[in-house]
Amino acid sequence: MRNFIIAIALLISAASVQAQTKSIPSATTDNSDDQESLAKTYLSQIMGVALSATSNLKLFEFVHEWVGTPYRFGGSSRRGIDCSGFTKEIYAKVFNLTIKRSSRDIFSMVSPVRKDELKEGDLVFFKIRSRSISHVGVYLGNGRFAHASNKGVAISNLEEGYYNRYFYKGGRLMAEYQQQLEDGGEVVSE
């Protein structure tokens, strides 16, 4: 009897965990416009970013999958990741581009962009209690950006007091890296 009760409890527990698992309507299983539109609507609502017809759905799906991943300095996996590791992962998996590893080195690959000129996929850099760049994230639109903070991978708003105070500059990959990206080539800049 005891084993039966334990088995029932395990089944209920497994069912509840599965029900809590986040899932997005996938645009990849069915390439119809309706599926993609449904996925964009869902991601728009949970991320607070209006996805347009030209939005990179792969970017938003990638960020959604990583939200909640714990922070770990020097980390580069789902067990723990830091800001530059997360940014590097996004560029590798979404844009098929290998970028440098530290936030300061990544900044050397960009042309500075003012906050009001940021576009989806641009980088945002911060000088948090430092004279040099100490944090990086990826701009999503509507003032929001994805990054690995000390609370884990999250989506934050550039206008929040903390991020607004420490914001340094936005950045867009320099033309030489953009061209290699458009050509489908990989840039290795380690």
Image (spheres, rainbow, N blue to C red):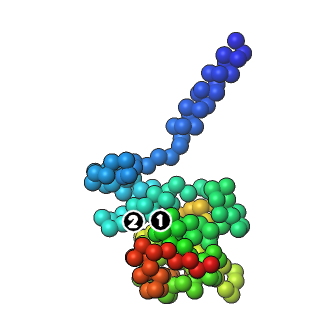
Q: Residue 10 is drawn in which quadrant? A: top right
Q: How packed is label 1: few (under 14 Cα within 10 Å), some, or many (20 or more)?
A: some
- Which residue is at 55% across, 31% downward? 15
**SS for callout 1:** loop
Foreground residue among 104 and 177: 177
Q: Earlier in the sequence, mark 2 or mark 1?
A: 2
Residue behind mark 2: 56
Residue behind mark 1: 94
The disc label shown at residue 46, or none: none
Position of 25 compared to 163: left or right?
left
Q: How packed is label 2: few (under 14 Cα within 10 Å), some, or many (20 or more)?
A: some
Q: Position of residue 126 (x, y in %)?
A: 60, 79
Q: Position of residue 50 (x, y in %)?
A: 37, 64
**SS for callout 2:** loop
Under mark 2, the amino acid is Asn
Under mark 1, the amino acid is Val
- Which residue is at 53% across, 43% downward? 21
